[in-house]
Image: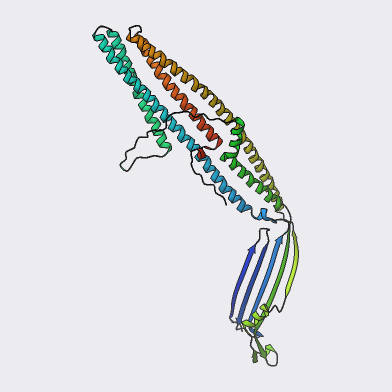
Amino acid sequence: GTQYTTKTDVFNLSLTQSFVTGGDVSLSLSNQTTDTTRNLVTINPTYTGELRFEISQPLLKDFGPKINKRDTRKARNQMDISVYSLKSTLVQKVYEVEEAYWNLVSAVESLKVNEYSFEHSRDQLKMTKEAARIGAKTATDVLDAETEEANWESRIISDRAQVQRAEDRLREIMNISGDASGMIQSIVPIDEPSVEKRRITFEEALKTALAQRPEMARVQKEIENSNIDVSYFKNQTLPELDLRFHLWYPGQSGDIKIYEPDNPLTGVVVGVDEGSRSESFNDVFGFKYENWYLSLNLNIPLSNVFSRASLARARVENKQKLLEQEREEQSIYNEIVEVFKELENNEKRLETSSRYRELMDKKLRAGEAKYKLGLLDSQWLFTYQREMANARVSEIGAILAYKLSVAKLERILGINLEIKNLKFRDYDF
């Protein structure tokens, strides 16, 4: 007839497994039923099935675990790169916090020295006024004492502003905000500005920095990724040589129509030899009809030209990463040289500032004794007092400068997180 209906029912089940060598193995089972209203069909409905086993293995291009694990290896290295970048940021942030903290300590200690000098000048003014009342001092001496008191008071105002700025800087770095009511609590340093000298040789420092600096670990992972790309694109320039093995077992059944007189063109059906879907499965799982072939396919695609361009680009990137590693090593070397010079200078500054403060203390005590006996003018006494205060501030500054140099050394070596007992999780996959 000119109009007919065909109904097809198909199902497939397939299992596929890939290997790190680049090969694939698959096992599939399929079955199909076809039923039609067309005339002159000798088998209807028909039942077909097939069990197929296939293995495919590249022998040149795309062969090997290194090639097929490329994306996974690069992804792991990329995560390590992100972790090392985070650690580098934390190392720098810890140093910035320490630097801001010791700057706050320096401002606080300088304020304490000037407050002490201010109280001392007030006492000195009282004694001068009393001496002037009994005629031992002149009005000029009183004026000088009042001027000195005003000078120290002016310094205190300036130092308090410096303390506030240092405190705001530390609060900003540590991201400390106010409480629910909007009140901002003051930061009170509790560590005393004492000195603990750090003893390490230049060779030990350089070795430690190259091993501990997260920047070095990050560059190393980037080099690993570039090496992976070089190996991959080098493999992609090879021809495609694939070994394939196919094994399959078909099965078939259906209702066979018997026409009179054994001629379908008559259209007269005199009988039906019935079949079933299960019979087709019996052929399949009984391995009745075995088929197989083994092939070796060679293909040289034109895309190899572009693969060579990618290989050249990967090699250039690899050289760039190696140069970046050398620059990083040279940068670390220069930083260590600079910080060692800074440590040496600050250590000498510690000794000289301490000795200078001791000498100024003796000089001030002698001057105060002479002033009480009337053997020293008040201007000289006030000069000694200012020099003594400056000597104390200078000594504190030398101590804190040395501590900051040590903190800078720990940052350069990449060990300040461990020294401060800050836990940093190492991701190991």
- Determine whether 364 is above or below 264 in the image: above
Quarter of the image where the N terminus is located: bottom right
**Residue ID at (27%, 7%):** 136
Q: How is the image coloured?
A: rainbow
Answer left or right for 1 relative to 374.
Answer: right
Answer left or right for 52 relative to 109.
Answer: right
Q: Image quadrant of residue 200?
A: top right
In percent of width and height, residue 223 lies at 63, 44
- Determine whether 278 is above or below 184 in the image: below
Q: Image quadrant of residue 220?
A: top right
In percent of width and height, residue 140 lies at 29, 8
**Residue ID at (39%, 39%):** 176
Extreme residue in the left direction: 133
In percent of width and height, residue 68 lies at 65, 55
Numbered label tally: 0
In percent of width and height, residue 314 lies at 66, 45
- Determine whether 36 is above or below 87 in the image: below
Q: Is residue 420 visible?
A: yes
Answer left or right for 292 relative to 427.
Answer: right
**Residue ID at (37%, 23%):** 113
- Determine whether 222 is above or below 384 in the image: below
In the image, 262 versus 176, the foreground residue is: 176
Answer left or right for 161 relative to 217.
Answer: left
Q: Is residue 41 visible?
A: no
In the image, 118 versus 164, the foreground residue is: 118
